[in-house]
Image (tube, rainbow, N blue to C red):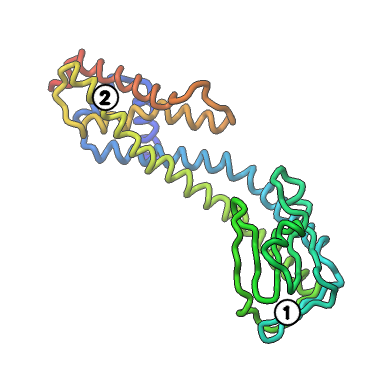
């Protein structure tokens, strides 16, 4: 509780009290770095909740719908047998498995078929048979990113038989992992936002510190870069708070470079106040 109160005290004064920056000139840089880390962690937690909570049910529904559509699309009569690295099917070739509606319903131009099984299939058949994948006697041919064709050998296929029952069992196993979706989404968002608010913003503050240093030189302040960077660690409170507020309400700023503009403006106000009050010369 004491740490929370201390953080709130520093946050509030960094946000609205230019006189507070007189006291910051006397403290070690470690204090300011600890404050910034706490500020970044709060921003990370709020942003993670904002993005992760609504994403969890959407991702879970997408996964379940995709699995259901794949099961509905997979032919019940198809059996695939693999023996000594060679495959056979119990249907005439070429045999196509349609792509689930999940893919074809999107705006992306996805092929009509997910896979075509044809021992005589070639790269040209990807386009002619309008398929995402084609399996011939020795290779799996896939239409990759940016229409790049990728080829994978089939020589390592294990012996066995695949039926609709096997596919159904596999799908249900995959579905059972949906309970881990919340953890995966939260972890992904948490790591991404933590990097953004911590690493990216710390690097960005070098630019702000240079701007404040330039203003300080104009006002004849005899301070080193470390001092200006320490001040920037606190003046970022205003734009960072605004950024988190924009994220929480789902809004976009009206003009570009607003973050740098507000940070630099408030920082310059602080530097001007320190210079005119004589605090920076002590």
Counting from the top left corner in percent of width and height, residue 266 is at 35, 20
Say if mark 2 contacts mark 1, CB within 8 Å: no
Tell me the SS state at disc 2: helix
In the rendered structure, the answer to whether residue 191 lies left or right of residue 28 reads: right
Give whichever of 179, 66 is nearer the camera: 66
Residue beneath the point at 69% across and 63% down? 133
Residue beneath the point at 46% across and 38% down? 43
In the rendered structure, the answer to whether residue 139 lies left or right of residue 252 reads: right
| Mark 2 nearby-residue class (10 Å; few <14, some 14–19, many ≥20) | many
Compared with 16, 74 (above or below) is below
- For label 1, the residue is 87
Res. 25 image quadrant: top left
- For label 2, the residue is 212
Q: Farthest residue toward the right?
A: 77
Compared with 87, 8 (above or below) is above
In the rendered structure, the answer to whether residue 150 lies left or right of residue 256 reads: right
Count every numbered label the image shows and give the total: 2
Counting from the top left corner in percent of width and height, residue 236 is at 37, 29
Q: Farthest residue toward the bottom?
A: 84
């Amino acid at each position: 509780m004491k740490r929370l109160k201390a953080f709130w005290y520093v946050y509030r004064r960094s946000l609205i009290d230019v006189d507070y920056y007189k006291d910051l000139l006397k403290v070690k840089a470690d204090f300011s770095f600890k404050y910034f880390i706490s500020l970044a962690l709060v921003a990370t937690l709020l942003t993670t909740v904002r993005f992760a909570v609504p994403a969890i049910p959407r991702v879970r529904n997408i996964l379940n719908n995709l699995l259901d559509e794949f099961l509905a699309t997979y032919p019940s009569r198809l059996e695939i047998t693999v023996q000594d690295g060679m495959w056979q099917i119990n249907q005439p070739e070429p045999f196509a498995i349609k792509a689930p509606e999940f893919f074809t319903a999107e705006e992306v131009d996805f092929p009509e078929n997910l896979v075509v099984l044809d021992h005589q299939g070639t790269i040209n058949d990807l386009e002619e048979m309008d398929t995402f994948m084609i399996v011939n006697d020795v290779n799996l041919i896939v239409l990759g990113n940016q229409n790049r064709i990728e080829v994978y050998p089939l020589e390592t296929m294990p012996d066995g038989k695949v039926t609709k029952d096997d596919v159904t069992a596999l799908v249900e196993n995959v579905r059972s992992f949906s309970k881990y979706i919340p953890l995966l989404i939260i972890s992904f968002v948490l790591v991404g936002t933590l990097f953004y608010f911590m690493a990216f913003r710390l690097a960005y503050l070098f630019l702000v510190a240079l701007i404040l240093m330039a203003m300080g030189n104009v006002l004849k302040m005899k301070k080193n870069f470390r001092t200006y960077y320490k001040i920037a660690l606190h003046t970022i409170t205003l734009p960072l708070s605004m950024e988190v507020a924009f994220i929480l309400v789902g809004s976009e700023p009206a003009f570009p470079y607003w973050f740098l503009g507000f940070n630099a403006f408030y920082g310059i106000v602080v530097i001007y106040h320190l210079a005119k009050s004589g605090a920076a010369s002590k």
